[in-house]
Image (tube, rainbow, N blue to C red):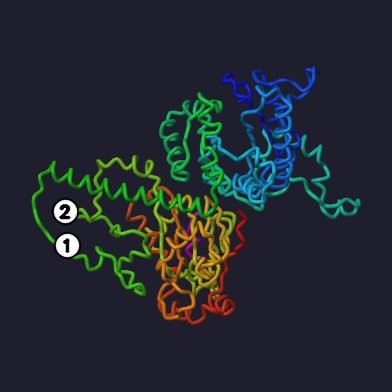
Amino acid sequence: LLQNNDGMKIAVIVNDVASVNIDEKLVVGGTTASISPTTSNDNSKPQEVIQLSNGCACCSLSDELLASVSELITLSDLRDPTDRFDHIVIETSGVSDPKAIRGHFQDSMFYNMPLMERVQLDTMCTVVDCTTYLDYLQSARSTAEDDSPELHYRNEEERQKARETNWMDYLPDTLAEALGEQVQRSSSVAPVDGTGVSDLLVTQTEVADIVLLNKIDILEEDRNADNRVREIESIVKSLNPRAKVIKTKYAAVDNLKDILGAAGGTGVAGAGVVDDHRDYVSASAAITTATAAATSASIVESNDKHQHQHSHTHSHDVDGAPCMDPDCTDPSHHHQEKSGDSMPATACTDPNCDDPTHTHDHSHIDHDTLSYAGIGSFVYRARRPFHPGRLTAFLRNLPIVRGVPGCNGNGEVSSPSGADKESEINIPSQASESLKCIIRSKGFAWLADSNLAAMYWSHAGSSFEMQCLGRWWATLPREQWPEEAKADILSDFDDARHNEDNASMSTVGDRRQEVVFIGTRLNDPSVQERIRDTLDQCLLADDEWISYKEQCSNEASLRTTFANPLPTRMLSY
């Protein structure tokens, strides 16, 4: 960036969590093209380089980050008009949360900070290390320094130097207190809320307008390089269908205009949790539609090629048309609301079938163009709440080791006892294997322990978290809805005429299950259906649903009747 010969004036803010900011030293040492020093001293730092040390720009140093941006704006104003900065690039540490960075800028906009009249968060870019990406994606470790020191330091020597510099941070609490020191750890050694490495990796992949697949040259030395790069690219595109993906060596991009100012502030920088969710639901729906269309087209092609001419009938009483009874819980019926789309439960096995409404498996279909080399996604939908206990039992069967009661650090599930046994669900072996294919799942969840709380389900790699977004819109008077968002809000209602005060209505408003699942083999409708069938077991049964509706105006009663073992927290944007 700083060595560009395109005539662009670029300021850089660099950040490391270590006590010695190696990145800052590398930037200063490598700056040759567009740097003019603040003084004539050869050892002075170029004025465009601002250092953030001993902390992560997404947390403890957020104020310093914005102050540094303000400082650069002032420096730019003092320069000759032809030499002022065109762009400011903020390079955060490898353990930074991009959602938090985005939140800082959005908060500044909301509170009308004068700084935001001069700058905007324009484009978010993530650099992926292709040599370690797949390993970290499957990792069960946390981002804490002791668990993953390589995320904080480049080598052991650097780590030891940091310990020597900040030796007070490593004293036992009791000893520090005995010495009269306040026990306050620097953020370089503090765990990041127990965040899993895989969880952070997924977040960094998702919250980006541009993803650079770096170190392609190193992978090319491997015999299986093409497949590995293809797999990484498939996962990245599935996790972030909005992003532009660029393959690089040494993170070098041919045209900086592909990065700088590329999103114009209209991409993920201006989005939030709800916006992100809508984009993923739309992307998943597009893939499902494309898959169904290609399948139908391939059937016609196959029939033309083999000249199969025959007629027969199929019964759609069970597997074809969806059951339209909203209160039906017969697992043999196909339910539009519970399953989220109208694809048949399993592929038709009649080799002579030419019914375009059936799903057929043809080996010549190029699924790679539809769901990225075997990485697929689908959306699970339902309009009944989950029983918290049975949902927890479901989550224990996902590849999760953090965030779900009963799962330990070794990925093993403890046997439920006592009241937990009443929440068990039946998971056949094939369904169990399908659940292990899930890499990422996220979306809106409705739990039976509350009629008010809109929950957000977030699972990434080996980590899970259930977060509270606030209240369902249906529980708020419509005059309190933002005028500009009313159309979007009503689009999530099962009936726009829903009236929360009308007990005779059978509608539920925007309360819903709407969870996107991403993973290997999830482009296979039979795998999707197994996951749906298992989740359907977690929904309230008919008698439970009646009990829920009788108690829905009493939150305390719901919490008692449908006890929730899952830890939850309020979502911070």
Callout 1: SS:
loop
Q: CA distance from mark 1 to mark 2?
A: 10 Å
Looking at the image, is 303 positioned above or below residue 248? below
Check whether the beta carbons of the residues at disc 1 and disc 2 lie within 8 A of each other.
Answer: yes
Give percent across and percent down for residue 137: 53, 44
Image quarter of residue 15 = top right
Q: Which residue is mark 2?
A: 353
What residue is drawn where x is 28% and y is 50%? 292
Q: Nearer the viewer, residue 338 or 50?
A: 50
In this rendering, would 215 be left or right of 366? Answer: right
Q: Amino acid at mark 2?
A: Cys
Secondary structure state at the residue bearing disc 2: loop
Q: Indicate the amino acid at tag 1.
A: His
Residue 163 picture quarter: top right
Residue 5 highlighted magenta (yes or no): no
Crowd rating for badge 1 (residues with CA inside 10 Å; few <14, some 14–19, many 20+): few
Segment tinted magenta in the rendering: 392-399
Q: Residue drawn 47% across and 36% down?
A: 244
Q: Quadrant of the N terminus?
A: top right
Q: What x and y, as percent, mark residue 269? A: 56, 44
Rendered residue at 56%/55% (across/down): 401
Q: Report the disc number at residue 314.
A: 1
Q: Foreground: 385 or 46? A: 46
Numbered marks: total: 2
First in residue order: circle 1 vs circle 2 = 1
Residue shown at 36%/55% (left/top)?
527
* 71 relative to 200, above or below: above
Residues packed near mark 2 inside 10 Å, few (<14), some (14 to 19) or many (20 plus): many
Is 432 placed above or below 167 here?
below
Q: Is residue 303 left or right of residue 400?
A: left
